[in-house]
Image (cartoon, rainbow, N blue to C red):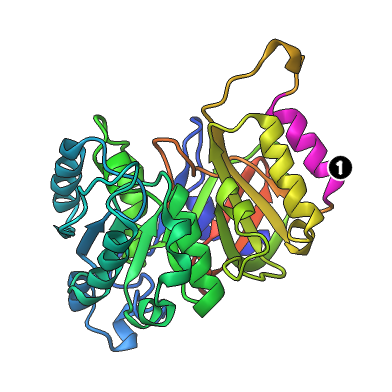
Amino acid sequence: MSASKRTPARQGAPSSDNGPRHAGGQAGGQGPCPACGAHGQDDCGHDHAALAAQASGIYLFSPSSAVADPQALERARKRLAQLGFRNAVDRTALAVHQRFAGTDAQRLAAFGRAVKQKHPIVMATRGGYGLGRLLPQLDWRALADSGKRFVGLSDFTAFNLALLARTGTVSYSGPTACTDFGAARLDPLTPDLFAETLRGELEVLSFESPDSDPVDCRGVLWGGNLAMVASLLGTPYLPKVRGGILFLEDVGEHPYRIERMLAQLWQAGVLGRQKAILLGRFTGYRLAPHDRGYDMPAVLQWLRQTVKVPVVTGLPYGHVPTKATLPVGARVGLATEDGMAYLVLQEHDH
């Protein structure tokens, strides 16, 4: 993936502001086919109108914490419909048991209904906590064989990685219904990134990354919330990815805790096996006077000095309004050049 072949990324590169840009397929039926990946849709033989219709249904369920604001779920439904996604809500999506969206049995049953219903996309209403309790009881083969495309963030990382570890199936780390589509103000870019990724239209995600290490590589994209990744160490639910591109984010964790979890992954041999470490946003923490300047830049300096793997920063992903939708388990490309980073989700010969 040399620099001279990244034409789509260059077309999507930002010119002045700090927001990410994306490059989708070409117009006139020449974009990549979402079914087979063929770049020339006119020649691949698939009914692309039918495929687009099949990709337009979303089933909303709550596998982790309870939904705090039912109105947010209603806003999410309306906005998803406006975006072209028909949607339905699981019957226990608003259930409450302690801090959870229902009992463990109720949330397990919601997975069973999700794989049997007609909509091809299954989206979590929110993150929080609770999926780790369910991992040993989920039917991973049934989930993979269902063909559903699962989407979530934060606590949903446990599901994304477990599905990859147990079956090799790709799922998505991205927006959740209530937190993103149900927010008081909807970010203008997140819905487009979500829709284009799920419809197979997004080829390259480019974003400003002025302090990144030089890198030009391909590998399996995997990761998610750092705390959840670290929590899966030593379990059968952490994928054994070698030569991958590990993406990470977190919220509410002080930089020393971020460093401690990164050190755990490093000492367990996980970080050293990757081709690149791709960092999203680390937000929602508060420094103390005795930190004396110790902040995320110090963590990055330690990471670079300790782990001899390229580090790329600035990924629009995490507990922030603007977030990309990332295919966990897919083979992608990553390159940096002139203060920009390019995540190639679909690579084609133009």
Q: Quadrant of residue 285?
A: top right
Relative horizontal placement of residue 341, taking residue 263 as reference (left or right): left
Q: Which of 280 and 144 lies nearest the eye of the viewer?
A: 144
Residue at 14%, 52% in the rendered image: 81
In this rendering, is residue 98 above or below 44? above
Task: Count the numbered circles shown.
Answer: 1
Majority SS type along the magenta span: helix
Residue at 16%, 40% in the rendered image: 75
Say if residue 347 shows up in the picture: no
Can you give x and y, in whole percent of width and height, for residue 216 in the image? 70, 60
- Residue tagged by mark 1? 305
Task: Tell me which amino acid carries mark 1.
Answer: Gln
Can you give x and y, in whole percent of width and height, for residue 347 in the image? 52, 70
Q: Which of 198 and 140 lies nearest the eye of the viewer?
A: 140
Residue range of the region highlighted in magenta in the rendering: 295-307
Residue at 36%, 70% in the rendered image: 31
Within the magenta stretch, is there residue 299? yes
Q: Quadrant of residue 199?
A: bottom left
Can you give x and y, in whole percent of width and height, for residue 169 in the image? 47, 75
In this rendering, is residue 203 above or below 341? below
Relative horizontal placement of residue 237, taking residue 134 as reference (left or right): right
Residue at 27%, 85% in the rendered image: 46
Say if residue 278 shows up in the picture: yes
**Label 1: how many Cα within 10 Å (few below 14, some 14–19, many 20+):** few
Residue farthest to the top, as pictured: 289
